[in-house]
Image (cartoon, rainbow, N blue to C red):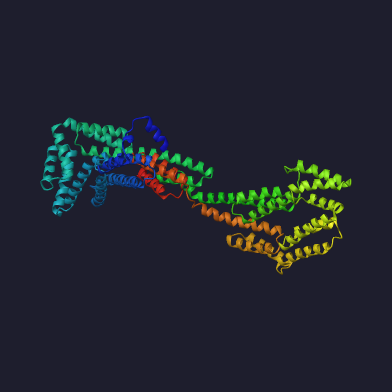
């Protein structure tokens, strides 16, 4: 974004090239001081495009947004309660006064924030007049009982005379009222009408007929036609308060209808998006969609039911995803164990590696992966199979060495085996044939080499690698069955292996192991985190005493993964954003404020929803959306 702006600036003459950020900030501050909020935000946004990390400017933009929102909300409330006060002024004084107070207080709030706003200016005179009318109505209510009765009697007489078209007599009653209530709105309007009728009877009749027609159209909700008639009344009789009031009501009705249609259209767009996001399992976005629908039109279609269903849908989807993942972990791990036990070490490595990719914290899979790699390395050192890149070099030497040995050409055969051992010092078949050749050619060399192999076997014994020790001893036994002490060494290795197994059992009998295994299965089937942890303890007890118990090993891995993935899901909801995501969040957030400052509410909401797609926990963006939706609804 910054790079693009710099390129644009380099291609055209733009003021920012000749201005510093301080210059722009000073101009923006002046706009703010002059209550020109939109211009102030525009200038500060220019600074943020050049320097997105400028926290001081960020705070200024946010503050102006809050001020403008406070002004917009106060203006909405002022208009709403002005209308309610007007409706009730001559019906329910107390309610009218309460609404008037709310309207005036909110108008004052909006005026203090932005006195130059055209809407604020438009309301100013109306609020002054409302305040005066409420004061007069209050003064009328405070009249003595006798005057009140006189007032009501005179109003009734005046209205009756107006209905009978005896305007001169009506005028007398209106003047009498004004003699003791000089600024009474009802009397002033009555007097104006009476004078109008006296001075121009034909126009008065025309106005009266137009009013009857216009009011009838209004009642039939034919607001456009009614509006035309009332305007005609005002053209003939510019001071007609009744026509003015009806025009205000019509404007409100048309505005409500227009706003409702706009909100209905927007609600439908969000509703369609919500249904689509549910289908795609984008539950966070779907929640935002349906909340936006309800924010615009509370009972739109089945948005509330759709919103209420999302937690259950999300829970079921996450459960299915966890099961799929766990099934994959379990399957790969078991295949890895089977391949390892069958000596297919490359396969085992592949399966355990896939297990770790699915479950990066799987300690057991990592251990078996290491074991498989070590086993493969040992096998590659001892054997060169068809998969080895050295096979085409080593195999001919093996075939040639065996052939020469069978022909009794021991020296030539020995050279082949030495070549192999120079590359693979632990190659099993080369070691065996070299011993055989030395036995035939040079007993002293044979004795040295066999002693080396015996010593390696003893070292394996001391490191408790009993199987490898036994393998070394059996190699000597296969070549020289009567080798001194070889049977004792083999017996010692076998005894050590048995002792190791008994040590693992720690006094547990096979029946104990089976009982603990079944206990683990029972707790596993019960489900729930606590039962899973108990089951895991039983299976680990079994594995600690019988490492070869593959059933228990599989269950240890299965439950460990299940518990770990459940925890990861909870932690993932609180994941940290990357620097790039943080930058995008700021960009979209302030862009939304910029749109709001220009009264482009839908675009503002769209930007803040982008913020929530990246950072679902961003409360400021969520609050802003709810504020704007509430404002649009009002």
- Asked if residue 521 lies left or right of residue 114, the reply is right
Identify which residue, 278 or 233, lies in the foreground.
Answer: 278
Residue placed furthest toward the bottom: 507
Residue 118: image quadrant is top left
Residue 28: image quadrant is top left
Identify which residue, 429 or 379, lies in the foreground.
Answer: 429
Residue 39: image quadrant is top left
Location of residue 106 in the rendering, given as x and y in whole percent from the top left corner: 27, 48
Identify which residue, 204 or 475, lies in the foreground.
Answer: 475
Location of residue 103 in the rendering, given as x and y in whole percent from the top left corner: 26, 47
Position above or below: 64 against 471 = above
Location of residue 76 in the rendering, given as x and y in whole percent from the top left corner: 30, 44
The image quadrant where one finds the N terminus is top left
- Asked if residue 32 lies left or right of residue 526, the reply is left
Q: Quick check: can you spot residue 222?
A: no
Location of residue 505 in the rendering, given as x and y in whole percent from the top left corner: 71, 66
Q: Residue at x 39, y 39 (%)?
A: 603
């Amino acid at each position: 974004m910054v790079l693009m702006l710099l390129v644009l600036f380099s291609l055209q003459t733009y003021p920012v090239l000749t201005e510093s950020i301080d210059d722009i900030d000073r101009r923006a501050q002046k706009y703010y001081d002059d209550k020109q909020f939109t211009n102030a935000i525009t200038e500060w946004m220019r600074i943020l495009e050049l320097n997105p990390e400028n926290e001081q400017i960020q705070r200024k933009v946010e503050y102006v947004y809050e001020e403008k929102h406070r002004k917009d909300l106060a203006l909405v409330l002022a208009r709403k309660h002005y209308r309610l006060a007007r409706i009730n002024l001559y019906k329910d004084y107390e309610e009218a006064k309460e609404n008037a107070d709310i309207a005036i207080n909110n108008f004052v709030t909006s005026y203090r924030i932005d006195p130059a706003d055209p809407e604020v200016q438009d309301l100013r005179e109306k609020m002054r007049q409302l305040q005066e009318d409420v004061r007069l109505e209050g003064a009328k209510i405070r009249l003595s009982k006798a005057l009140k009765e006189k007032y009501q009697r005179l109003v009734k007489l005046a209205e009756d005379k107006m209905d009978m078209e005896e305007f001169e007599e009506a005028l007398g009653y209106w003047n009498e009222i004004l003699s003791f209530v000089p600024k009474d709105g009802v009397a002033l309007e009555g007097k104006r009408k009476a004078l109008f009728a006296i001075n121009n009877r034909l126009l008065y009749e025309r106005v009266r007929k137009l009013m009857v027609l216009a009011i009838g159209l209004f009642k039939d909700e034919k607001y456009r036609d009614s509006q035309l008639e009332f305007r005609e009344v005002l053209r003939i009789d510019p001071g007609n308060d009744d026509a003015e009031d009806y025009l205000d009501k019509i404007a409100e009705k048309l505005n409500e209808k227009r706003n409702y249609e706009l909100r209905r259209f927007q609600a439908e767009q969000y509703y369609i998006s919500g249904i689509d996001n549910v289908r795609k399992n984008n539950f966070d976005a779907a929640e935002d969609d349906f909340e936006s629908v309800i924010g615009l039109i509370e009972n739109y279609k089945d948005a509330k039911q759709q919103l209420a269903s999302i937690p259950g849908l999300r829970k079921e989807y996450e459960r299915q995803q966890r099961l799929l993942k766990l099934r994959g972990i379990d399957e790969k791990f078991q295949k890895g164990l089977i391949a390892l036990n069958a000596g297919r070490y490359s396969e085992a490595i592949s399966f355990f590696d896939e297990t770790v990719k699915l479950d990066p914290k799987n300690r057991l899979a990592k251990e078996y992966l290491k074991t498989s790699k070590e086993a493969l390395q040992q096998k590659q050192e001892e054997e060169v199979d068809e998969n080895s890149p050295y096979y085409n070099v080593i195999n001919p030497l093996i075939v040639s060495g065996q052939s020469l040995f069978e022909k009794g050409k021991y020296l030539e055969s020995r050279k082949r085996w030495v070549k192999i051992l120079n590359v693979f010092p632990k190659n099993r078949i080369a070691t065996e044939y070299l011993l055989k050749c030395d036995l035939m050619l040079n007993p002293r060399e044979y004795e040295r080499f066999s002693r080396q192999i015996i010593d390696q076997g003893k070292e394996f014994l001391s490191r408790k690698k009993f199987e490898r020790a036994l393998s070394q001893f059996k190699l000597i036994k296969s070549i020289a069955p009567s080798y001194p002490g070889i049977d004792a060494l083999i017996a010692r290795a076998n005894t050590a292996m048995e002792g190791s197994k008994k040590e693992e059992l720690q006094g547990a009998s096979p029946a104990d192991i089976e009982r603990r295994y079944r206990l683990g299965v029972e707790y596993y089937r019960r489900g729930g985190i606590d039962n899973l942890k108990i089951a895991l303890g039983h299976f680990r007890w079994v594995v600690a005493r019988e490492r070869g118990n593959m059933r228990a090993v599989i269950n240890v891995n299965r439950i460990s993964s299940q518990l770990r993935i459940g925890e990861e899901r909870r932690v993932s909801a609180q994941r940290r954003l990357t620097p790039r995501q943080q930058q995008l969040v700021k960009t979209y957030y302030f862009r939304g404020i910029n749109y709001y400052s220009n009264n482009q509410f839908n675009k503002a909401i769209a930007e803040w929803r982008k913020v929530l797609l990246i950072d679902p926990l961003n409360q400021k963006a969520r609050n802003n959306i709810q504020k704007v939706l509430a404002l649009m609804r009002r």
